[in-house]
Image (cartoon, rainbow, N blue to C red):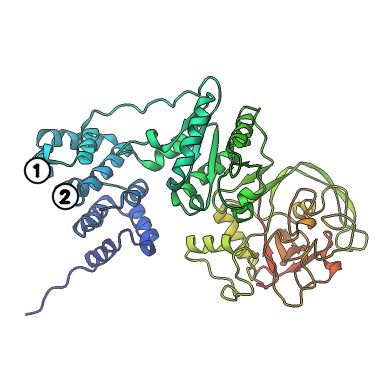
Amino acid sequence: MMRKRAPRAATNLKFLAARYGDEHWREVIRLFVAMAPRSLFETFMQAVVAAGGLAGRHEYTSRCLREALQPSERPFVKALSNAAQRYDALQALSVLRDLNPEPLRRVAEALNAEPERFFRVAASALAAAERDLAARLLAPAAPSPAPHPPAAAGPVVFISYSSRDKAVVTRLRSALEQSGIRVWLDVGEINPGDVITKRLEEGITESTFFLPVLSPHFLRSSWTQLEENLAWQREVEEGRVVVVPLLLQGELRHLPLRYRQRRFVDLRGDFDAGMAELLAFLRQPAERVLVRMNAVDATELVLVPAGAFQAGKPEQPDNKPRQMELPAFYLARYPVTNAQYRKYLDASREAAKPEYWDDERFNQPQQPVVSVSWHDAQAYCKWAGLRLPTEWEWEKGARGTDGRPYPWGKDDPDPSRAVFGNLSGQPAPVGSCPAGASPYGLMDMAGNVWEWTASDYDKGPRKTVRGGSFYDVARNLRAAIRYGNHPDSRSRSIGFRCAQDP
């Protein structure tokens, strides 16, 4: 007698449910729930519950529920009878209540009427944490509380930190509150059953400043990464300084690029002196942001003001001297690095690795990414919410307004100002030649790698590249020089940097 096979769809769902929470399958599962109709979502989550997959995965479950096309409370109601998963099921139901209160109102009514039918034990037999969550879930829905008003004597600050630095953060909080500044800290602001990411976003939105307490622990935390990305994005939207870094441990050179050019308060030595500096900064008028940070890929973008600049050079037949007028724009301080491009590859399954991606001469994290076509560069910019600069934006960013031949001025290139004439044949980490900065503080605008621009070379089909590279001679590093490359070309000496409109 032949055994009937399980339907393929059911087998696939069971396979996927068994990998719930697995780091390698998280993106696939999130994509699935974002497309699944309610019936399929329920079948999948029931399989997750049957496999014991809810336990200890509230953060991931919360994210799946927020991104789901048609989430359902039914699998989590059934999971209330499982002692090992009851607490996580209650947390999931609390998330669903915040997303859509009406279905959970009916669940609350049923639980109130017959708690033992759902929990399989008396309500009094639940663990204390489970009782607290259940009481919150069963309470009548109330409107969201209004944001806390700022303290009269000062602003509101959000402190982002690693739990391993809690002792110093407690001291920091006390000093701020004694000075009349209200502090938003996760302790006391986030309650059991809250959608954690939602509360964090609310806290960052209602705060005047965001204070990241920088230490090696901070840099390894996924929660602090989420918080700082929200804060940098808010800074972009408001056009003022929001992020005020506090350096607690470690060296500045070990910090991410987004912090290296930012004013920071040093708490490594004299804590009281650092606090005095911080309080003075928090109480001064808001500073306009001349440098913004892109939340998607951590690109640091520098404002290039509107106005005229001197383009071209007499010895360049395809770029004759002339005055050009450009509106304001932002240009990346550095070319896109391999570390940034790796993040793009991880998020974009259809993107192909560059040809030299596995070559250790070209794949170090802080080297500029190379062997990318113009189309590759465009795709990256689209993913990051940025764009390629026009070649004239690139030229103004490289040389300022006075027509200087090189970013740093009139002096000939040397190894302190640019990476060029490199017979070993590989680029240096971005920012290796600070003496070669442009008038706007942009790095690597001469040498290291040629850079794609958005502009056609003459009438096409080639695209313009600018800047020279690690193997070029000195004369090719002049800011007015322009070359054309086919947009499909992938060269180990060509990379790109990003731009953005104000």
Q: Which residue is mark 1?
A: 121
Residue sitting nearer the eye, 32 or 428:
428
Can the viewer see residue 123 in this picture? yes
Which amino acid type is marked by label 2?
A: Ala
Coordinates of residue 387 in the picture (x, y in percent): 64, 53
Is the Cβ of the residue at disc 1 closer than 8 Å to that at disc 2?
yes
Identify which residue is drawn at 20% across, 68% down. 7
Q: Quadrant of the C terminus?
A: top right
User: Residue 83, labelled with which disc?
Assistant: 2
Q: Quadrant of residue 112?
A: top left
Residue sitting nearer the eye, 303 or 70:
303
Question: In the image, is 342 to the left or to the right of 401?
Answer: left
In the rendered view, would you say 3 is above or below 160? below
Tell me the distance, in whole angstroms, between the alpha carbons under discs 1 and 2: 10 Å
Residue sitting nearer the eye, 14 or 378:
14
Coordinates of residue 197 in the picture (x, y in percent): 40, 43
Coordinates of residue 277 in the picture (x, y in percent): 64, 34
Q: Quick one: which residue is furthest to the top in this view?
A: 152
